[in-house]
Image: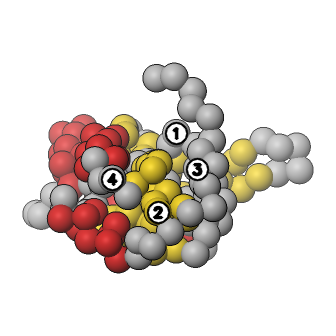
Amino acid sequence: MPIQKPYKPSPDEKTLYFDITGMTCNGCAETITSVLARETFVKNVNVNFLTARASVVVTRHIPAETVMKIISEVGFGATKQTKFEPVLISDHNTFYYVVSGMTSERDAAAIEKFLIQHNSEIQSCNVRYSTQAAEIRAFVNASPEKIIAFNEQIIAYIQSAIPDKTIVARELKPVIKESKEVEQTYNN
């Protein structure tokens, strides 16, 4: 894909900013982009799946609600923002969990399968019976609220993945030491 120069709106245009909900992949972002780009009053569109945000340049007289209605008609939610705060996000975030109660590699595989089937943000998942731990790489907007909600959801999924067993999960948070080495430690 060619690198695009930033679009500078003319005086008779304005930029609208939205948080987008319901996207599960880049295809969703492309759908929103293509639908909005067909509108004559839309001058530029940028929808980012990883940050779940969109900026849309429209002619000045178009209200945000018009753009929000178009987005909702293709199955997504949009909330108008006045501006974007920076989002700390890489191509993924890695989360670690202690998972106790597994009695075999079969349990670990069942938890992995359950997680991948129930959370579209998960890029990869590695649950190990031998270490009673899980490592999950996911596309998650790095706002504190979304990280907390993601962790709560993953813990609930791990604990309900095998109905006839009591599985307990806890997030394992990294602690940065003076030497810049990362040591994994349990939440207290």
Q: Residue at x 34, y 47 (%)?
A: 37
Give the foreground label among 2 and 1: 2
Q: Earlier in the sequence, mark 2 or mark 1?
A: 2
Q: Residue at x 72, y 45 (%)?
A: 182
Classed neighbour count for the residue bearing mark 1: other residues with Cα under 10 Å, few (<14), some (14–19), many (≥20):
few
- Percent coordinates x, y for residue 83 in the rendering: 61, 69
| Quadrant where the C terminus is found in the figure | bottom right
Residue 173 higher or lower than 128, as above or below: below
The residue identified by callout 2 is 59
Classed neighbour count for the residue bearing mark 3: other residues with Cα under 10 Å, few (<14), some (14–19), many (≥20):
some
Give the foreground label among 4 and 1: 4
The residue identified by callout 1 is 91
Disc 4 marks a residue whose amino acid type is: Thr
**Disc 3 from disc 1: Cα separation:** 7 Å
Q: Earlier in the sequence, mark 4 or mark 3?
A: 4
Residue in the foreground of this view, choosing between 52 and 172: 52
Q: Earlier in the sequence, mark 2 or mark 4?
A: 4
Disc 3 marks a residue whose amino acid type is: Ile
The residue identified by callout 4 is 40
Task: Work out which residue is located at the far top of the displayed protein and give it.
Answer: 2
